[in-house]
Image (cartoon, grey):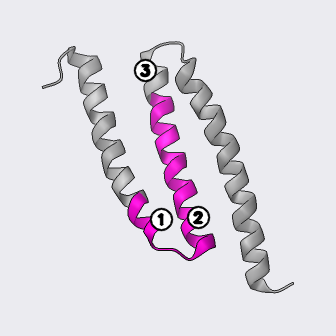
Amino acid sequence: MTLADIFQLVLYISLAIHVVLLVVCIRRVWSGANVIDSLMGFDAVNTLILAVLVILALSQAEDLFLDVALAMAALGFIALVALSKYLADEQMF
């Protein structure tokens, strides 16, 4: 077993762990006790999706996944700030 094979195995195990955590966080978004819990679950889902995209970029040697992850990080941050402001002030702008 070469070092590249071990690296691929570790990436696939890490991908499986992240997908399981993603399912747990999506459950938290759906059944959050209040809106703040759902918002925190949304942020965790966004972060885990970014991690999955980076792991896929490493395992597939594809740069497109990194570009998509960067765009999703920016959009996720903007959405989180907008939703937090809406919850705090009850108005969007």
Sequence order check, earlier mark of 1 and 2: 2
Residues under numbered marks 3 and 1 in contact, where contact means CB atoms less than 8 Å apart: no
Q: Quadrant location of the C terminus?
A: top left
First in sequence: mark 3 vs mark 2: 3
Q: Residues within 10 Å of mark 1 (few under 14, many from 20)?
A: some
Give the amino acid type for the residue marked by disc 2 in the picture. Answer: Leu
- The location of residue 11, given as percent across then percent down, is 69, 66
Label 1, label 2: how many angstroms apart (C-alpha)? Answer: 7 Å
Q: Which mark's residue is nearer the viewer, 3 or 1?
A: 1
Q: Quadrant of the N terminus?
A: bottom right
How many residues crowd around disc 3 within 10 Å: few (fewer than 14), some, or many (20 or more)?
Answer: few
Quadrant of the rendered image containing residue 23: top right
Residue at x-position 54% and y-position 18%? 32
Judged by depth in the image, the label closer to the viewer, 3 or 2, is 2
* Horizontal side, residue 10 vs residue 40: left or right: right
Image: magenta residue range:
40-68
* Residue 11 on the magenta segment: no
Q: Position of residue 57 (x, y in %)?
A: 54, 68
Residue named by callout 3: 36
Which amino acid, by three-letter code, is at mark 1?
Phe
Kindly identify the residue that appears in the image at 51 percent across and 74 percent down: 62
SS at circle 1: helix
Asked if labels 2 and 1 touch by Cβ distance under 8 angstroms, the answer is yes
Determine the secondary structure under disc 3.
helix
Q: Is residue 93 above or below residue 64?
A: above
Reading the image, the residue beneath label 2 is 56
